[in-house]
Image: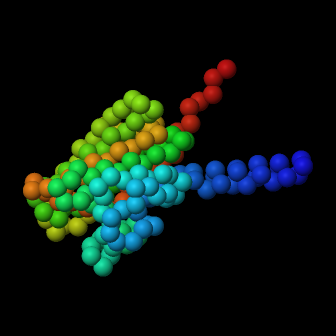
Amino acid sequence: MRQWIGCVVCVWLSATAAHAGQVSIGFEGPGEGKAPVEMPEDGYRIVTRDIMISSAAKSGDGTDGPNEVESEMNARGAIAVLRETPFTFISLDWQSETGAPQIVVEGYSGAVMVARDRFVARGIGTGFSTFAADALRGHSIDRLILYLQRDGSGMGALDRVILEDAAELPETS
Protein backbone atom coordinates (compact mmCIF):
# COMPACT_ATOMS: atom_id res chain seq x y z
CA MET A 1 0.00 0.00 0.00
CA ARG A 2 2.79 2.42 0.91
CA GLN A 3 4.48 1.82 -2.49
CA TRP A 4 1.22 2.51 -4.29
CA ILE A 5 0.80 5.86 -2.46
CA GLY A 6 4.41 6.76 -3.27
CA CYS A 7 3.78 5.96 -6.93
CA VAL A 8 0.62 8.12 -7.00
CA VAL A 9 2.54 11.03 -5.42
CA CYS A 10 5.32 10.71 -8.04
CA VAL A 11 2.80 10.73 -10.90
CA TRP A 12 1.03 13.76 -9.40
CA LEU A 13 4.31 15.67 -9.02
CA SER A 14 5.27 14.85 -12.61
CA ALA A 15 1.90 16.04 -13.91
CA THR A 16 2.15 19.25 -11.88
CA ALA A 17 5.64 19.95 -13.22
CA ALA A 18 4.43 19.38 -16.79
CA HIS A 19 2.08 22.37 -16.48
CA ALA A 20 4.73 24.77 -15.16
CA GLY A 21 5.79 27.77 -17.25
CA GLN A 22 4.12 29.41 -20.24
CA VAL A 23 1.25 27.80 -22.12
CA SER A 24 -0.10 28.76 -25.52
CA ILE A 25 -3.84 28.20 -25.89
CA GLY A 26 -4.45 27.74 -29.62
CA PHE A 27 -7.91 26.10 -29.76
CA GLU A 28 -6.27 22.99 -31.18
CA GLY A 29 -8.79 20.24 -30.44
CA PRO A 30 -12.00 20.86 -32.36
CA GLY A 31 -12.42 21.16 -36.11
CA GLU A 32 -13.92 23.99 -38.12
CA GLY A 33 -17.42 25.17 -37.22
CA LYS A 34 -19.24 26.08 -34.05
CA ALA A 35 -16.93 25.78 -31.04
CA PRO A 36 -17.89 23.29 -28.37
CA VAL A 37 -19.30 24.86 -25.21
CA GLU A 38 -16.44 23.39 -23.20
CA MET A 39 -13.04 21.96 -24.12
CA PRO A 40 -9.82 21.21 -22.24
CA GLU A 41 -6.46 22.47 -23.44
CA ASP A 42 -3.04 22.33 -21.77
CA GLY A 43 -4.43 21.97 -18.25
CA TYR A 44 -7.00 24.75 -18.65
CA ARG A 45 -10.77 24.54 -19.13
CA ILE A 46 -12.02 26.63 -22.06
CA VAL A 47 -15.73 27.61 -22.07
CA THR A 48 -17.19 29.35 -25.12
CA ARG A 49 -20.32 31.32 -26.02
CA ASP A 50 -21.22 32.23 -29.63
CA ILE A 51 -17.75 31.28 -30.94
CA MET A 52 -16.76 29.80 -34.32
CA ILE A 53 -13.53 27.96 -35.10
CA SER A 54 -11.79 28.47 -38.44
CA SER A 55 -9.21 26.02 -39.70
CA ALA A 56 -6.10 26.79 -41.75
CA ALA A 57 -8.08 26.03 -44.92
CA LYS A 58 -10.25 29.08 -44.21
CA SER A 59 -7.87 31.36 -42.35
CA GLY A 60 -5.18 31.44 -39.71
CA ASP A 61 -1.47 32.05 -39.84
CA GLY A 62 -0.42 28.84 -38.11
CA THR A 63 1.26 30.66 -35.23
CA ASP A 64 -0.06 28.14 -32.74
CA GLY A 65 -1.61 25.36 -34.70
CA PRO A 66 -4.04 25.66 -37.58
CA ASN A 67 -7.09 27.06 -35.75
CA GLU A 68 -8.28 30.53 -34.84
CA VAL A 69 -11.54 31.60 -33.23
CA GLU A 70 -13.97 34.42 -33.83
CA SER A 71 -17.40 35.54 -32.65
CA GLU A 72 -20.44 34.41 -34.55
CA MET A 73 -21.69 37.23 -36.77
CA ASN A 74 -23.52 39.99 -34.88
CA ALA A 75 -22.93 38.25 -31.55
CA ARG A 76 -20.70 39.22 -28.66
CA GLY A 77 -18.82 35.97 -28.46
CA ALA A 78 -16.94 35.16 -25.29
CA ILE A 79 -14.27 32.73 -24.19
CA ALA A 80 -13.58 31.92 -20.55
CA VAL A 81 -10.23 30.34 -19.65
CA LEU A 82 -10.33 28.76 -16.19
CA ARG A 83 -7.99 26.88 -13.92
CA GLU A 84 -8.05 26.12 -10.20
CA THR A 85 -4.35 27.01 -9.88
CA PRO A 86 -3.68 30.77 -10.30
CA PHE A 87 -2.12 31.96 -13.55
CA THR A 88 -1.26 35.22 -15.30
CA PHE A 89 -2.24 36.56 -18.72
CA ILE A 90 0.84 37.33 -20.87
CA SER A 91 -0.40 38.15 -24.39
CA LEU A 92 -2.70 37.29 -27.29
CA ASP A 93 -2.57 37.31 -31.09
CA TRP A 94 -5.49 39.22 -32.64
CA GLN A 95 -6.14 39.88 -36.33
CA SER A 96 -8.19 42.49 -38.15
CA GLU A 97 -10.35 41.08 -40.92
CA THR A 98 -12.37 44.28 -41.50
CA GLY A 99 -12.61 47.64 -39.75
CA ALA A 100 -10.95 48.07 -36.36
CA PRO A 101 -12.19 45.20 -34.19
CA GLN A 102 -11.49 45.15 -30.50
CA ILE A 103 -11.07 42.40 -27.97
CA VAL A 104 -11.75 43.03 -24.28
CA VAL A 105 -9.92 40.84 -21.76
CA GLU A 106 -10.96 40.64 -18.10
CA GLY A 107 -9.08 38.81 -15.37
CA TYR A 108 -10.78 37.55 -12.19
CA SER A 109 -9.63 36.16 -8.89
CA GLY A 110 -12.66 34.39 -7.49
CA ALA A 111 -15.65 36.68 -8.03
CA VAL A 112 -13.55 39.88 -8.10
CA MET A 113 -12.46 41.46 -11.40
CA VAL A 114 -8.76 42.24 -10.99
CA ALA A 115 -8.25 44.29 -14.18
CA ARG A 116 -9.41 44.77 -17.78
CA ASP A 117 -7.44 45.26 -21.00
CA ARG A 118 -8.81 46.38 -24.37
CA PHE A 119 -6.94 45.82 -27.61
CA VAL A 120 -7.86 47.16 -31.07
CA ALA A 121 -6.52 45.59 -34.27
CA ARG A 122 -5.75 48.17 -36.90
CA GLY A 123 -4.87 47.60 -40.53
CA ILE A 124 -6.78 45.06 -42.58
CA GLY A 125 -4.73 42.24 -44.00
CA THR A 126 -1.69 42.89 -41.83
CA GLY A 127 -1.89 39.49 -40.19
CA PHE A 128 -1.94 38.88 -36.49
CA SER A 129 -0.69 41.45 -34.01
CA THR A 130 0.58 40.39 -30.62
CA PHE A 131 -0.85 42.42 -27.76
CA ALA A 132 0.89 42.12 -24.38
CA ALA A 133 -1.04 42.37 -21.12
CA ASP A 134 -1.19 45.91 -19.83
CA ALA A 135 -3.55 46.44 -16.86
CA LEU A 136 -3.55 42.65 -16.29
CA ARG A 137 0.26 42.31 -16.37
CA GLY A 138 1.53 40.31 -13.40
CA HIS A 139 -1.88 39.85 -11.76
CA SER A 140 -2.66 36.41 -10.34
CA ILE A 141 -6.04 35.23 -11.67
CA ASP A 142 -8.05 32.02 -11.90
CA ARG A 143 -10.39 33.12 -14.72
CA LEU A 144 -9.76 35.06 -17.92
CA ILE A 145 -12.69 36.20 -20.06
CA LEU A 146 -12.18 37.40 -23.62
CA TYR A 147 -14.95 39.24 -25.51
CA LEU A 148 -14.37 39.14 -29.28
CA GLN A 149 -15.94 41.78 -31.55
CA ARG A 150 -17.55 40.80 -34.84
CA ASP A 151 -20.04 43.37 -36.15
CA GLY A 152 -20.34 46.31 -38.56
CA SER A 153 -17.54 48.17 -36.76
CA GLY A 154 -15.03 45.40 -37.23
CA MET A 155 -14.33 41.71 -37.45
CA GLY A 156 -11.36 40.05 -35.83
CA ALA A 157 -9.92 36.61 -35.19
CA LEU A 158 -8.01 35.28 -32.19
CA ASP A 159 -5.13 32.90 -32.90
CA ARG A 160 -3.66 32.24 -29.47
CA VAL A 161 -3.54 33.30 -25.84
CA ILE A 162 -0.32 33.02 -23.82
CA LEU A 163 -0.68 32.27 -20.10
CA GLU A 164 1.83 31.53 -17.38
CA ASP A 165 1.77 30.07 -13.89
CA ALA A 166 1.36 32.79 -11.28
CA ALA A 167 4.41 33.52 -9.15
CA GLU A 168 4.26 31.79 -5.80
CA LEU A 169 3.87 34.01 -2.78
CA PRO A 170 6.81 33.97 -0.38
CA GLU A 171 6.32 31.86 2.72
CA THR A 172 5.85 33.67 6.01
CA SER A 173 6.53 32.36 9.46
Residue placed most toward the observer, 84 or 63: 84
The residue under the point 42% across, 68% down is 30
Q: Tell me: 159 left or right of 163.
A: left
The answer to whether residue 172 is above or below residue 109 is above
What is the tally of numbered marks visible in this picture?
0
The residue under the point 45% across, 67% down is 29
Percent of width and height locating residue 162: 41, 54
Percent of width and height locating residue 81: 42, 48
Residue located farthest toward the bottom when viewing the structure as drawn: 57
Percent of width and height locating residue 146: 32, 48
- Identify the image quadrant of the C terminus: top right
The residue under the point 31% across, 50% down is 78
Q: Quadrant of residue 121?
A: bottom left
Colour scheme of this structure image?
Answer: rainbow
The residue under the point 33% across, 64% down is 34
Residue located farthest toward the top when viewing the structure as drawn: 173
Q: Tell me: 135 left or right of 4.
A: left
Looking at the image, can residue 131 be seen? no
Q: Tell me: 21 left or right of 80.
A: right
The answer to whether residue 134 is above or below residue 113 is below
Looking at the image, can residue 10 be seen? yes
Percent of width and height locating residue 132: 32, 49
Q: Quadrant of residue 124?
A: bottom left
Q: Tell me: 157 left or right of 35.
A: left
